[in-house]
Structure formats: C-alpha cells, structure tokens
Amino acid sequence: MSNLQAKFDAILDDVNQEDGLILTAFEKILDGLFFLIKWGGIPLVIYLLVAISRW
C-alpha cells in the first residue's frame, strides 16, 4: 500500500510542476491531434465545398 502511495505522490508532484513529464506528454498528444485535425480537416472541408457546388 505504501508503494502505491509513493507512486501517487510522485504523480501528484509531477502534475504540480509547470514542466512535468505528464503535462509534457499531454501537450505532445494534443499538438499531434490538432495537427491531424488541421491538415486532415481542411482538405475535407474543401472537398465538401467542391462537392456541394457541383450538386
């Protein structure tokens, strides 16, 4: 049980840091998802506009 408490304290300390490992990982994940949405979504919207204009 004390091992679990030590891990929880380490995670809590990491989250409370401004440049912690967990926050950095979430930042990279969100940047990647935003990149995919941006560069995958813009061509989709253009395609939809072209498809609708031919309708």
Image (cartoon, rainbow, N blue to C red):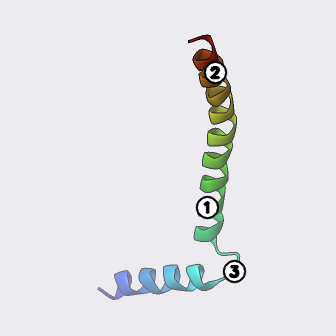
* Residue 4 sits above or below residue 51 on the image: below
The amino acid type found where label 1 is placed reads: Ala
**Quadrant hosting residue 37:** top right
Q: Which mark is residue 25?
A: 1
* Percent of width and height locating residue 26: 59, 62
In the orientation shown, which residue stands out farthest toward the left?
1
Report the Cα–Cα distance between label 3 and label 1.
12 Å
Tag shown at residue 42: none
Quarter placement of the N terminus? bottom left
The image quadrant that residue 16 belongs to is: bottom right
Which residue does the numbered mark 3 point to in the structure image? 18
Q: Are marks 3 and 2 in contact (CB under 8 Å)?
A: no
- Disc 3: CA contacts within 10 A as few (<14), some (14-19) or many (>=20): few
Q: Nearer the viewer, residue 33 or 53?
A: 53
Dot 3 or dot 1, earlier in sequence: 3
Q: Earlier in the sequence, mark 1 or mark 2?
A: 1
21 shown above or below 3: above
Residue type at mark 3 is Glu
Residue type, label 2? Tyr
Q: Residue at x 63, y 17 (%)?
A: 53
Residue 24, image x and y in percent? 66, 65
**Residue 36 in the image: above or below residue 13:** above
